[in-house]
Image: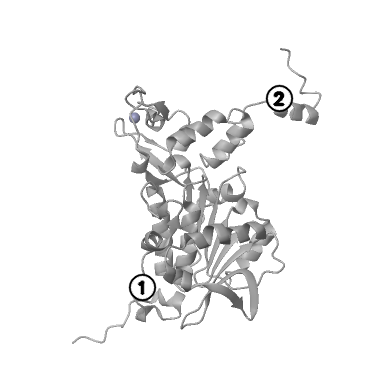
Amino acid sequence: MPGRRKKKTDEQHIPDRISGGRAGISRQKPALAEFLEKEIRTDSGAFSFVGRETLRETVDHLDEILRLGLPERTVSVLKGTQIGMTTVAIGLALYTVYVHRLNVGYFLPDQDFANRFDDTRVRPAIRRAALAAAMRDGRYRGAASKGLKEFPGPDGSRFLYILGLRDIGNAISLPLDLLIRDEVDDLPPENLRWSNDRLDASKLALTVNLAMGRTPGAGIQAMFEEGDRRVWRVPCHACGAEWALEEHWPDVLREAGVSSEENPNEEERLRLACPACGASLARSAGRWRPGGSEAEAEPLAGHRSYRISQLAVPAVRLERVAAKWRAAGRPGERAKFRCSCLAMPDAGESRPIDAALLNALRAAAPLQMEAAPV
Ligand SMILES: [Zn+2]
């Protein structure tokens, strides 16, 4: 028998860092994806990745961070609306506190928003009685606080704190391991700093930002740029090109070319097509690719970022996206469409010059900006 082997490799020690050394004796923890499918409910039944294949990599990455205890990570999601990411974030919050026994802050713009969110999103998302029964209204150091959920256990209590960040005057200073910031574009910067300070004592210190972008170069869009800028690229099997669909809207939208007699459902009369050769594209067949060019700044270490448009999520019907596009005639409505559907906040070259813009420019520089003759 050779010399005594080390009981554990360094790698096996990693989970101990986030669980006070108790990981070794606990039962096997379910993966985050499994927890979402088993424990989380949506408006249309149990959570499923069918039609939301795009979200799978983000979920698996978050799972890996928690499982290995990877410290100081950030995941930022620049998203379209209605793609299911908030449901995933609620599931992540419950999973982290219930399965990994860590403290979680779910931060929203204001307290009204937070109170509504608790009643309309968090409680209805819990599918099974065991999880609901594990949670009670919380007290921390003897103080009750609105939005504080306590998960008691033999190793003491862990907390989920749902808080509006605009008014943090009455907030308790609970130390956190995971900070989820939803609709971060709406949060005051000094209060964002307060939220960051909650992570100071954590060995994990994981931050998840998710929001619809409203302002190019600020908020979640800036966070996306700071990270490794992953975009969902869909391959064309006919010509071999790969497309980020949102960058080529509306060129990727085509009539399916089938008569309405045969195909009365209008949804099927639309399809996504390769802008180069016209062949049909299957959005669920896409892959995550790092975006950006070599000329751009290096992504910050440990910061993974995703842009997820409605076009990347088959659960959002193409007909709905097309109908919103048709209804968005004015420049302001087009800009809103780009934010909420395409996840591409953009006030730059895509903004048409309209009368309001010309008037504003004239007011700012009257000598240079005479009205053009008609
Ligand atoms: Zn093609």
Disc 1, SS: helix
Residue 340, image x, y percentages: 55, 41
Q: Is residue 123 visible?
A: yes
Residue 44, image x, y percentages: 43, 51
**Which residue is at the front of the view, 265 or 32?**
265
Residue 135, image x, y percentages: 51, 72
Q: In this rendering, which labeled residue sits more in front, label 1 or label 2?
A: 2
Residue located at (59% from left, 38% from top): 336
Q: Quadrant of residue 130?
A: bottom left
How many marks can you see? 2
Circle 2 crowding by C-alpha within 10 Å: few under 14, some 14–19, many from 20: few
What residue sits right under mark 1 in the picture? 11
Q: Quadrant of the C terminus?
A: top right
**Which residue is at the front of the view, 76 or 256?**
256
Residue located at (43% from left, 64% from top): 65
What colour scheme was applied to this rendering of the protein? one colour
Q: Quadrant of ligand 1?
A: top left
Q: Which amino acid type is marked by label 1?
A: Glu
What residue sits right under mark 2 in the picture? 355
Which disc is residue 259 wearing?
Answer: none
Please tell me which of labels 1 and 2 falls first in the chain.
1
- Within 8 Å: ligand 1 and the Cβ of disc 1? no
Q: Which amino acid type is marked by label 2?
A: Ala
Residue located at (56% from left, 40% from top): 339
